[in-house]
Amino acid sequence: MTGRAANPGDQPRGIVAGSLATGGPERPMTATPLDPIVDQLARSEAELREAQAIAQLGSWSLDDATGELFWSDETFRILGITPGSVQPTLALFLSLVHPEDRAAVRQELESARLRPDGVYSIEHRVLARDGVQRFVRERGRVRFDERGRSLSISGTTLDLTEHINDQEDLRQRERLERGLLELSAMFLQRPGRGMDDLINEALARMGGLTGTDRAYLFNADSRRRSFSNTHEWTAPGIHPVIELLGDISWDLVPECARMLNAGAPVVIPSVSELSPDHPERAFLEAQGIQSMLLVPVMEGDALNGFVGFDAVRNERDWSSAEVRFLQVFGSLMISTIERDRAYAEMMAARQREMIGHLASGVAHDFNNLLGVIDANLYYLHGTVTGPGVDPEIAQVLDETHSAIGQAKVVTSGMLSLSRAGKFASERVDVEAAIAELVRILKHILPAGIKLDVTLEPQLAARSTGGFLQAALLNLALNARDAMPDGGRLHISGSRVPRPGPAAVTLGDAGSEDLVQLRVADSGCGMDAGILERLFEPLFSTKAQQRGHGLGLFMVHEFVLRSGARLEVDSCVGEGSEFRLLLPRWSESLACSQPPGRGIDGRVPETLRVLVVDDDPRSRDSVRRLLEMDGATVVAVEHGLACLERLRREPDFDLVLSDVSMPVLDGAELCRILHERYPALPLILMTGQAPVVFPGTHLPGNPAVLRKPLDLEDLRDVIGGLDLCAGRRQGSAE
């Protein structure tokens, strides 16, 4: 064997010894009868070296008399030393034995010499010269002379490192599997615990199971191309870095971002071995990271975030079991998040449904009352104003009219909660809508708040006028309450080419050609926690006496159901800005719009109208409005009374009927009139939202006016009817 370094003065004993020992004489050039034997021995020696390398089994011998130690090539390799580069000694060998095992090895060497059979057997660790800790099993036997004295000991060294590591990997996999089962149970049961608490405990358990120094979770924002550290666990003595990693651009860690977005784990056993110009090396070293493992958390094909481990104190290899452990944990977490989201959406849907039922009923009744008040106020305004009237009366009427206008807008907002589904869009004149809003705000804003309004001319949006005004009013009232000590409220309208970035976004209005309505205040602003819950129903940061938690929820519903987009930015102490983005009304759609009101759109004085409403106050208020224009009006209390009147007096020009009535409601009345009096025009009145009662399902497609009635809208609809000269003749019942 070539493992022993011979002393310079030693001479080979015979040709065989000389040819195989390190430093022996060269074989003579002249062929001899021994050459085939020498060649055979050389081949056998080479085969033995190869066999030892394959089996990771080295051989050795120690001469007790001379202290000379022999190592085979494989023994050198196991000890991390180049074969033949040093003179093996017992002292050198013991220096490579792990300090915690050294005494046991010495004891076993001494005990073997005292045993009758001379057996030497021990397993221990070595700290090899190449920096690798290896596990070895040594077996040998002592050779004694005829008097029982120890002459030498020889044996083998088997490298168990791979076997021990396999066993440790198996034990580690078993530990990780048990840990995953515990984590799964924890996430599934989670009695009354929030997601943040669960994640923090899970990271602590994961860190303990894997022996890592840091365990953490990052969220990914593909729109902003950034990562954000949301949760972190650190081992004792390890400095947390979560405060430094709140918003990390993908450009700072391009390779990690590329792999994570592709759904691949990032495994870095040694940061120091990354090339000096590696784009992420300096960033990782700044956090004290020596080794890192990142596993993406995917939601479908989209990157939701990632879970990661850092080794800070020492470099380490990451096992496939640890990679798989993180992958399964990421899947467990995303499934829990999806389950929570589905549950939250279900509960929110139920909550919206309950609020919607309540809002619909209240708004319907409230609209009926508003209709009476508004019509009677209009009647009073026409009768008590004029030259010589006390100015105080005019002011009272103006303030009352403003309050009714606000009530109408609030009721529109309540109706926006009534049912699911999209709103029917129409052309909304932004200037007119904002002007009406400003008239209301001037009566309700305190003197300490300065209102600024800036509008581009001729802005028109595709939206729903009443619901849009309700959304803007709620935003303005929210701004007012954010400035208890006064401030500035700015409302503006302009065209924008496309949506922009924002702290909070909601809805989708398309990608181009938009109208932006901006409501900005100089108030107290909102922190991240409030922004996260901004649109929850019944959530309010205001005092109990001031906030009901429905205002911004109404805005939320308007945005999602009208095809709009809302962008929100806010900073504590600096104010908030809400940007409502609506599709711009294209001029090519103008042909589909109803004709505008005339300057004097009064109903014809010869008009004979049959008003049907179960509420006597509503009947009388509508009657007065029509009679102010000179029409002849007959009022009845329900649909059966209407049919009876028509049977006796079929010469009416128009039927104006409420929808909700206890005896033969407006929808059923419409069907009967269409069958019996097909030429008789019908206009329906309702306090319900368009999504609840659109009217399009009725025969004849009658016009539907929303309560409280606007006299000008009523005049416009009547003016568009085919009211021929003479009375309509209906068929007998």
Image (tube, rainbow, N blue to C red):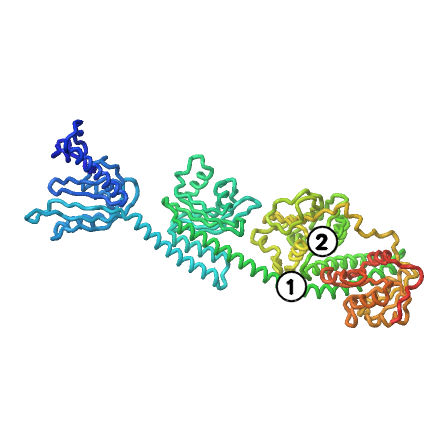
Q: Spot the residue most to the right.
A: 726
**Apparent side of residue 577 relative to residue 57 in the rendered image (left or right):** right
Classify mark 2: helix, strand or loop.
helix
- Give coordinates of residue 176: x percent, y percent: 39, 55
- Give coordinates of residue 574: x percent, y percent: 61, 47
- Give coordinates of residue 309: x percent, y percent: 42, 48
- Amino acid type for the residue under numbered disc 1: Glu
Label 2, residues with CA under 10 Å away: few <14, some 14-19, many ≥20: many
- Amino acid type for the residue under numbered disc 2: Leu
Q: Spot the residue most to the top.
A: 29
- Res. 341 in view: yes
Taking depth in this image into account, of 98 and 677 the one nearest to the observer is 677
Quadrant showing the N terminus? top left
**Apparent side of residue 249 relative to residue 512 in the rendered image (left or right):** left
- Give coordinates of residue 80: x percent, y percent: 27, 40
Residue drawn at (58%, 49%) of the image: 572
Q: Are marks 1 and 2 in contact (CB under 8 Å)?
A: no
Residue drawn at (11%, 53%) of the image: 116
Residue drawn at (90%, 55%) of the image: 387
Task: Give me the C-alpha separation between circle 1 and circle 2.
Answer: 21 Å
Taking depth in this image into account, of 286 and 507 the one nearest to the observer is 507
Residue drawn at (37%, 45%) of the image: 316
Q: Which residue is mark 1?
A: 353
Classify mark 1: helix, strand or loop.
helix
Q: Which residue is mark 2?
A: 468
